[in-house]
Amino acid sequence: METKWSRYYGDDVFVPDIKEGQSAYEAFRDTAQKYPERVAVEYGKRKFTYKELLAEVDRYASIFSVQGITAQDRVMISCRRMPHHIIAFYALNKIGAGVVFVMRNARPETFAKVGGQLRASYMIITAEVFPKYRMMLIHTPIKKIILTRSTDYASSTEFFNPNILEQRRHEYYDTEQDKGRPGPEILFWTDLWQGDLPEVNTQVSPDDTALCFTSGVAAGDVNLTKLSSRALNAQAKLSAFLLGKEQSRVFSFIRLDFSFGVCFALHTTLLSGHTYLVNTQKDLEFSGHDINIYKPDILIGYPQMITSFIDSKKISTKALSKVKTIYSCGNLMSGADYHRTRDFFAKKHLKPKVIRLYGITETGSVCMYIPELEFRPSVLGIPIPGVRMKIMNPETNGEQMYGETGVIAINTPSHMSGYVNAVDDTNTVMRTLPDGSTWILSGDLGTEDEDGVFHYVGTRRRIFDRGGMHIYPQMIEDSIRAVYGVEECCAVPLERDGQTIIKVAVRPVSDFLFNNDRLNDLKDQIEKLCEMEMPGPMRPDEYEFVAYLPTEKYGRVDYESIIKLFKEEENEQEDHENIGSDTSSVDGV
């Protein structure tokens, strides 16, 4: 369909033959049957052709069925980057069971909350992190836990891969100790097979919930976002335009508990017949080992991971010469990092494309991109083919004129089906217009110029911009809450000397509150965690330990009161400094 953005796309818009009205498993199966001998997934030196990967998916669909998983079940998955993620998702989708990917570093209470909201009955989790959550899981609906290990699919020669070796050191777990204890049954992934396996032929509707993510923030609060197989397949069909039809080796830094990691990096890669390279490094840490071994054609990553990549001194020029395109997504890449990335390759006489993407979980990840030669700092980009966007007045659902500020609204066939147990937030974000079209309100404010290019202006509610990046305080808080000794926290922006700083109010557990040594150690742990997991603009500048956090009428933390409190403290400090300065002057006379 011709649109005002068609002139940007060029003549060759790749649209793979994907049937949206089928399950995600069926779409993958069709691709596997089309390219049976192509390599679908590489995990170190272990390679799965499409034919082999499909066979493993079918085998585990039967195994899961024997284990009692049905179309009515919901399964939580929390694993390191390993083939289990991929196999489990498509196998469970074949059965019709819904999946929710949960961040590995989430608080135990988060696992309990998600499990309770979805009434999850099964969980697949990496053996090394399971002990942290074992006692909590006793009090959830989960009745069976499946433990995965990095060596389950690694070839014997890979046991000394430095990344896998590091994981192996922490993966020992003795299930014998759990026999007779209350709580879920605990099994290892490799111990699930039980003799003959039945054939699974479940009829799965493409409109059933296939996948949930815990990172939906368009409404201002974090919600569980529901995506159907139809939405996942539509996203793959749309974003295949970006990866192209030439068979490529795709390396993603994005974890599979985020929509960009599953919907774009994984599902689009496999449904387009490319090779997905499983990143064996630690979460949010950079290692050049996989780049040197895999020699990828395409890189997909957060901006901070891309800058870590170009700062690495351990990547061979031979490996770099294979990279033809880099996609930055998940956060907005600043203009400075964009130019630094381009300059890095230019100095090596290499010219990969650097494409900046924009999207949210509620739209199934990618919905727009910035044309490569667009340099204006405020530009968000243009919609990818098949997506429409406009600037909307959320009060009237009317479209704003060129140059007028409003909410960025997206019409895409890959939109979510709603939030879990959050009807009001769903209605806030999803708008159905009189013509029957559904629009997702992103929560970001912007303008559209007369060329059809969208510009970022600001954001609503708690989301704010710093260093050219959207900052979601909830994500900062979720990470800090995972630190032992933190009871609750709240991250807020403060304006100081024309700059935005991030300050976090941290309520420690009672045992820490009046122990300065423990508080100092706790602060060091928080700072190290934030430095490891967060890009520069997202890292807090200051922390303050508090005995309590003010709350609103319905129990939510009162962010405005915390901002007001911090400002009052700063004003008092300035007053004290001024009084001290005046006194010094008098004493000196």
Image (cartoon, grey):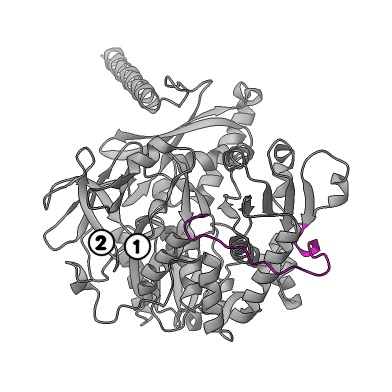
Point out residue 335 in the picture as x, y percentages from the top left corner. Answer: 29, 60
**What's the amino acid at mark 2?**
Gly
Q: Which residues are magenta?
A: 188-209
Residue 40 visible within the image: yes
Is 499 left, or right, of 203 in this rendering? left
Residue occupied by mark 2: 381
Of residues 376 and 520, the one nearer the viewer is: 376
Of residues 458 and 322, the one nearer the viewer is: 458
Instruction: Label 2: state its secondary structure.
Output: strand
Residue occupied by mark 1: 357
Of residues 344 and 292, the one nearer the viewer is: 292
Of residues 210 and 70, the one nearer the viewer is: 70
The correct choice, above or below, for 165 with respect to 350 in the image is: above
Magenta span: predominant SS is: loop
Is 269 left, or right, of 198 in this rendering? left
**What's the amino acid at mark 1?**
Leu
Q: Quadrant of residue 559?
A: top left
Tag 1 near tag 2, CB within 8 Å: yes
